[in-house]
């Protein structure tokens, strides 16, 4: 799979830099690589990146949170909103192996709402595999 | 028509006033110097022609006019000087020095006065000796005459007496007048003796000597001053308006008095002629001359005056005025901008205060301080940035002595979050007051709330404390578990937590029951507290629990807890809210009595449920069996409610599965409880 296009957007969150990078992958999949802390300050960037994806066309979304050290309720709300706005047949997967983030997902009870897998490959396999199965 | 954004458009009325003021100031500043250059001759309509004129210039050319005026002014100066020390008579001075000595001393003035007198006498003699002519009003190059000597004298006397009658203060003036009159009479006597109209010989220069007749009656006042100078080149008749009548005598050359006085100026080239004439009368002429000039100016229409003024305003003054006007404009503009800014800030401040008022009403209910045996405190610290708003709490009494606690956090911040916080707070309170357990209340309220949250979601913890049973029951929806002193925070099972309200998934699926046999503090808080930063790190639950333990020995209030958190953290991006309830009692530590989880078909098959069972101490071998039993119940009834009670000692926990966990009422739920033996 190759990167079709890059779209950079980011914001500073105090001491930790934040960056959202969008990559268009093959097989109708968009990848959002998130770097830094997902909190009140950076959540809007993630929100707009996800909104762009969803307004474009029906593409699967993989959100890579592997380089995210913290996620707060605002950012979780953004992910929840994106999940709930998915078109039928489109899937969203979260790649994350960071303990802190996983624990937050668990604490908030949202781990049951998302497909959270440890690696990016697993996430891509999930969204694209399901696409193949569905289509 | 498009309005050009000219600077003038922004000029406020005060600015226009200021501009006018500037012009007026410049006008005033220029008045004195301008008067020296301004032509003063006016011919007011309705002015009766002069009955007598000492001299009338034939030429009325401009140059001659100015010349005549110049001379007039000089003569006025002379008179002024002479008037300073009128009673002194000193030696004669040179005419030239008298003429040009503007700031002459008193002695000089007295000398001039004496000289003037002599000059007047000389002139009289000369006039008598020469061939003076009666003035017929014709334009003669120079004329010194008395018209109808007898009549004139009578009139003069009459006027003089009248004047004397009018003002008692004019003794000095009268003296002046007498001197002038004597001079005139001497001249006129000689003229009268000649008796006929004639022409003055060209070399004679005649200057008019001002009379002292403020009356309306035209008066002859002639002082013929002879000099060896050239003949009169041109003289201009200068008339002053009737207003001048009220003024005191106008003595000196060219001075005017009476309603229609005429000051005839000879444009004698010799300054001495004018000097002689001016000093002949020795009156105080200072005010007279100026008033004469200003009276003439005032009598003209304002427009004319302004136009003239504009004509003589120097460029430097224009520049100054322009600069002043610009400064005024700049100040006005900046003042206006500042005013608008002040208004805007004031409005924003009011809005902010209104927001705070709403927050106070919606989020900060008055706590009773103590509900039965339970001390209740709460505190709220809004974030200092855009994250403010969204947290809420409530503590209230329930029937049978129970105490209910609600702490929550709505996603979204600021004004938008306020309605949601209020909605949640009162809705959840209503369900709790209806008698539902915290989990049941959440379970029942969540669908209704989710519809009204409009895409937002909320994390919340609901709790009840039963002081009789010493049982604390709480249920979280995506919210941090409460902390209790004496209880390890890790004991609460995190796995398979219930999601927030509005996340699109059923919530109210978890409940924890704690026994609080002894005294303890229970802290309910929002995630803003544990997500505050200490040098980039999260403050965390561990630090908060430690702080709560320290708090238990001292001031046990939510406010002091948040104060300590604030002291230890350097960044608090989110609101912080906390409720602390103090349960009095002995040293026994609280313990978890039971954990409850509701499993639908999907949840029962998820890894979360397995983790939950594992965390609860269910042996791995049993987990599969329990979950399959739960799935069976969920298949029939929609969901299964699994309750895990901690076993005595280290034994395995007791599990209970019921099928009816969505019952809105406890009684119904209890009625349909079905125990599943494991």
Image (cartoon, coloured by chain):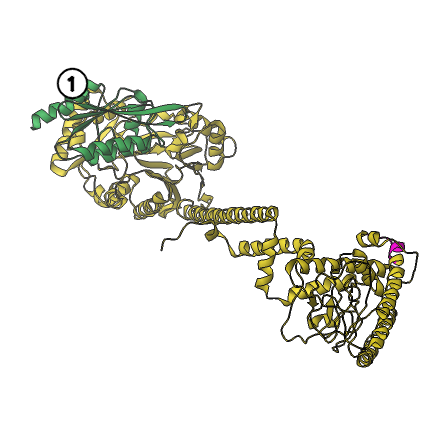
Chain colours: A green, B yellow
Q: Residue at (18%, 41%) from the top-left corner?
A: B672
Q: In the rendering, at what x and y percent does residue A76 appear?
A: 29, 31
Task: Give the quadrant of residue B576.
Answer: top left
Task: Give the quadrant of residue B267.
Answer: bottom right
Say which of B296 and B459 sits in front: B296
What is the quadrant of the C terminus of chain B in the image?
top left
- Identify whether B457 is placed above or below B366: above
Q: Specify the subunit that label 1 lies on.
A: A
Give the extent of the magenta segment. B103-109
Q: Residue at (81%, 62%) from the top-left corner?
A: B278
- Identify whether B576 is placed above or below B617: below
Q: In the rendering, at what x and y percent does residue B573 appear?
A: 41, 32
Say which of B473 and B98 sits in front: B98
Looking at the image, residue B393 sits to the left or right of residue B274; the answer is left
Badge 1 is on which residue?
A1
* Residue B560 in sight here: yes
Q: Give neighbour class at mark 1: few <14, some 14-19, many 20+ (Cα, 10 Å).
A: few
Is residue B446 shown in magenta? no
Say which of B323 and B49 sits in front: B49
* Residue B596 in sight here: no
Q: In the rendering, at what x and y percent does residue B605 appear?
A: 16, 27
């Amino acid at each position: 799979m190759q990167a079709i296009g890059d779209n950079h957007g980011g914001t500073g969150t105090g001491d930790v830099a934040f960056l959202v990078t969008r990559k268009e992958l093959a097989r109708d999949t968009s990848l959002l690589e998130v770097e830094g802390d997902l909190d009140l300050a950076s959540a809007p960037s993630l929100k707009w990146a996800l909104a762009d994806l969803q307004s474009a066309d029906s593409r699967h979304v993989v959100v890579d949170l592997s380089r995210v050290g913290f996620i707060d309720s605002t950012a979780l709300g953004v992910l929840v909103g994106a999940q709930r706005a998915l078109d039928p047949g489109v899937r969203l997967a979260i790649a994350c192996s960071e303990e802190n983030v996983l624990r937050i997902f668990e604490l908030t009870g949202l781990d049951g709402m998302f497909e959270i897998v440890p690696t990016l490959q697993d996430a891509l396999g999930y969204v694209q595999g399901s696409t193949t199965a569905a289509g | 028509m498009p309005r050009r954004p000219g600077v003038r458009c922004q000029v406020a009325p005060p600015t226009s006033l200021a501009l006018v003021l500037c012009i007026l100031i410049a006008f005033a500043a220029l008045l004195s110097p301008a008067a020296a250059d301004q032509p003063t001759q006016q011919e007011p309509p309705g002015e009766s022609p002069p009955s007598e004129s000492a001299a009338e210039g034939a030429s009325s050319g401009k140059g001659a006019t100015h010349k005549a005026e110049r001379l007039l002014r000089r003569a006025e100066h002379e008179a002024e000087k002479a008037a300073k020390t009128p009673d002194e008579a000193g030696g004669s001075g040179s005419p030239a020095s008298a003429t040009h000595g503007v700031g002459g001393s008193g002695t000089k003035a007295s000398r001039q006065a004496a000289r003037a007198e002599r000059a007047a006498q000389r002139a009289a003699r000369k006039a008598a000796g020469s061939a003076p002519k009666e003035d017929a009003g014709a334009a003669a190059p120079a004329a010194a005459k008395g018209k109808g000597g007898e009549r004139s004298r009578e009139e003069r006397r009459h006027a003089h007496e009248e004047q004397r009658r009018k003002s008692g203060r004019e003794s000095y003036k009268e003296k002046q007048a007498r001197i002038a009159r004597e001079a005139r009479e001497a001249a006129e006597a000689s003229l009268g003796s000649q008796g006929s109209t004639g022409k003055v010989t060209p070399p004679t220069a005649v200057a008019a000597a001002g009379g002292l007749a403020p009356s309306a009656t035209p008066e002859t006042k002639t002082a013929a001053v002879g000099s060896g100078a050239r003949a009169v080149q041109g003289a201009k008749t200068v008339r002053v308006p009737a207003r001048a009548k009220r003024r005191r005598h106008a003595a000196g050359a060219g001075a005017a008095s009476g309603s229609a006085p005429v000051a005839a100026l000879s444009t004698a080239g010799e300054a001495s002629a004018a000097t002689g004439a001016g000093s002949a009368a020795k009156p105080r002429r200072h005010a007279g001359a100026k008033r004469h000039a200003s009276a003439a100016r005032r009598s003209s229409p304002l427009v004319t005056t302004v136009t003239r003024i504009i004509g003589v305003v120097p460029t430097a003054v224009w520049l100054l005025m322009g600069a002043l006007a610009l400064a005024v404009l700049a100040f006005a503009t900046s003042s206006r901008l500042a005013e608008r800014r002040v208004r805007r800030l004031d409005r924003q401040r009011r809005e902010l205060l209104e927001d705070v008022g709403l927050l106070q009403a919606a989020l900060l209910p008055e706590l009773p301080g103590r509900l039965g045996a339970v001390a209740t405190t709460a505190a709220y610290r809004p974030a200092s940035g855009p994250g403010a708003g969204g947290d809420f709490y409530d503590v209230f009494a329930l029937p049978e002595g129970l105490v209910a606690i609600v702490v929550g956090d709505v996603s979204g911040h600021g004004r938008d979050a306020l309605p949601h916080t209020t909605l949640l707070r009162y809705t959840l309170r209503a369900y709790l007051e209806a008698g539902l357990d915290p989990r049941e209340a959440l379970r029942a309220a969540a669908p209704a709330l989710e519809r009204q949250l409009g895409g937002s979601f909320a994390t919340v913890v609901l709790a009840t404390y039963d002081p009789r049973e010493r049982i604390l029951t709480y249920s979280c929806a995506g919210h941090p578990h409460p902390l209790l002193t004496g209880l390890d925070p890790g004991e609460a099972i995190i796995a398979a937590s219930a999601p927030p309200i509005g996340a699109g998934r059923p919530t109210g699926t978890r409940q924890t029951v704690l026994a609080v046999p002894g005294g303890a503090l229970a802290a309910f808080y929002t995630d803003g507290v544990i997500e505050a930063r200490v040098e980039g790190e999260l403050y965390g639950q561990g630090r908060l629990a430690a702080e709560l333990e320290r708090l238990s020995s001292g001031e046990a209030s939510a406010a002091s807890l948040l104060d300590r958190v604030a002291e230890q953290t350097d960044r608090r991006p989110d609101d912080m809210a906390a409720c602390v309830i103090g349960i009095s009692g002995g040293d026994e530590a609280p313990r978890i009595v039971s954990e409850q989880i509701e499993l639908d078909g999907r949840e029962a098959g998820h890894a979360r449920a397995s983790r939950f069972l594992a965390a609860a101490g269910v042996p791995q071998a049993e987990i599969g069996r329990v979950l399959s039993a739960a799935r069976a119940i969920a298949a029939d009834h929609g969901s299964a409610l699994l309750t895990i009670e901690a076993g005595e000692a280290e034994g395995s926990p007791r599990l209970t599965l019921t099928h009816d966990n969505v019952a809105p009422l406890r009684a119904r739920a209890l009625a349909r409880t079905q125990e599943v033996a494991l």
